[in-house]
Amino acid sequence: MTTDTLARAGKREWVGLAVLGLPTLLLSLDMSVLYLALPHLSAELGATGVQQLWITDIYGFMIAGFLVTMGTVGDRVGRRKLLLIGAVAFGVASVVAALSTSAEMLIAARALLGVAGATLMPSTLALIGNMFADPRQRGLAIGVWMSCFLGGVAAGPIIGGALLGAFWWGAAFLLGVPVMLVLLVAGPLLLPEFRAPQAGRVDLASVALSLAAILPLIYGLKELAQAGRQPLPLAAILAGVIFAVAFVRRQRRLADPLLDLRLFSDRTFSSALGVWLLFGAVQGGSYLFFALYLQVVAGLSPIEAGLRLVPSAIAMIVASLLAPVLARRIRPGSLIAAGLLVAAGGYVVLTLVDGGGGVPIVVAGLVVSLFGVGVAGALGTGLIIGSVPSAKTGSAAALSETSGQFGIALGIAVMGTIGTVLYQGRFAAPEGLPAGVASAAEESIAGATIAARTLPGDAATRLLDAARDAFSSGISSLAWISALFFVALAILAAVTLRQAPPTGGAVPAEEDGRHADEVARA
């Protein structure tokens, strides 16, 4: 059977894809806009440092925690229905966030936004998997979907800066309201309904176990990156692992599990998911340091730094759209490996930062590396969604998103620790500094920046120069480590994904059966 015999998407599906792109664009834009709004809202609401962390982090925690549950719920109650329910919840939570009168109220609104976001993300990706049965069209549709997400990341600093310049901080949250209204009107007209046939009830004990596993793990990894090897984050990670084991054991016993572990028996699915997690860890962990370089070393404002990152986001968008076209003639595994090698080349460019190249080197290196990541990301997501039965695309989409969340959290923890060790090993405090100032500066470049504010002009300059030199040298070494990781991942992808055929070639028998599944329509 070839792809020509599969039902091809028509005009309605492609217009529907534009509708699905709206919440995807919003979710990524919402994350980047908050960082610009945080100083304004913190001053007005009187948020403490701890409350500021919860305002930013609770959103990601809730998304990560509820993705698996919402992906399965969408499979069972209907993916369009869950998408529209999530749109209502996201719109309401956006208004509450914008009108918050206290930090506690805003934290609660952000938590609700995260839960609503967990309904939107897997629903959009799962619907794409159902609407585009033809592998060629599905690959391009996923590339467009990923481009919408990346477009939000690129546009966030620009739109956020404009809004904050003209209105109050709450306007950043009100972006979600018109987008969700469009989704609620256009969704029922353009998006078909899909749900798994003969779906059973959601096992609430499994939901509780999944939350008890994911939330402590994400929290522990993030805290490990910020606070180091402290008892609380290590205990949280251990608790998460224990609950994860309990969750897996329960899924094996249930006739109708929350998460069908048989998905992992498919080699393409499990391999693509593993590569997706690992390269997300390397990219997410190291990218943070180069974004930080633009502000703490180059001295750019958040908006200026965001604008310098736009070219790399555009490169990733171009790669996401180009990769599915190339995959019609070249095996996806080979293209993913090639993309990871290109990403490695970008990190080799970034090693030159220590040589005084500065901002142009960072911009050029990130453009090259994110182009390669765009190729790998678009094709990896396509393999994850395309390798499971239609009835399970919601679960597959949720696992893909959850894997990405874990990858980034793991990368920030591991690469953050490596970057901190490299900085501390290279930092040499100038002579004559007070002991407390030198000790704070040795911890991190952020500590050095804060400590420098307590010193007179010449002493502050010498301290900042020493910290910036140590940071630049450290991230140069981190770039070498990242490049080697990407080369290793390229080899892993080439070996484990070699069986996946080009999307223009013959479809394996199991792929044929995937689209023969009965899909219940509302």
Image: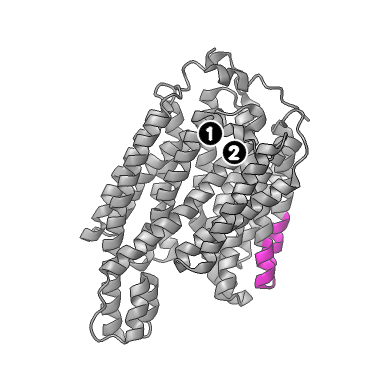
Residue 79 location, quadrant: top right
- Residue at the (51%, 46%) spot, across then down: 404
Q: Left or right: 366 with respect to 356?
A: right
Task: Answer few, some or many: residues within 10 Å of disc 1's Cα (few below 14, many 20 plus, some between 14 and 19).
Answer: many
Sequence-wise, the earlier of marks 2 and 1 is: 1
Q: Which residues lie in the magenta part?
A: 92-109
Q: CA distance from mark 2 to mark 1?
A: 8 Å
Q: Does residue 154 appear in this view?
A: no
Q: Is residue 106 magenta?
A: yes
The x and y percentages for residue 291 are 39, 59
Residue named by callout 1: 384
Circle 2 — which element?
A: helix
Q: What kind of residue is marked 2?
A: Ala
The answer to whether the residues at label 2 and label 1 have Cβ atoms under 8 Å apart is: yes
Residue named by callout 2: 397
Q: What kind of residue is marked 1?
A: Ile
Circle 1 — which element?
A: helix
Q: Check the image and report above or below for 464 versus 503.
A: below
The x and y percentages for residue 192 are 71, 30
Q: Main secondary structure of the magenta part?
A: helix
Placement of the N terminus among the 4 image quadrants = top right
Residue nearest the viewer, comparing 271 with 446: 271
Q: Left or right: 364 with respect to 497?
A: left
Marker disc for residue 57: none
Q: Check the image and report above or below for 382 versus 294.
A: above
The x and y percentages for residue 368 are 33, 44
Residue 495 location, quadrant: top left
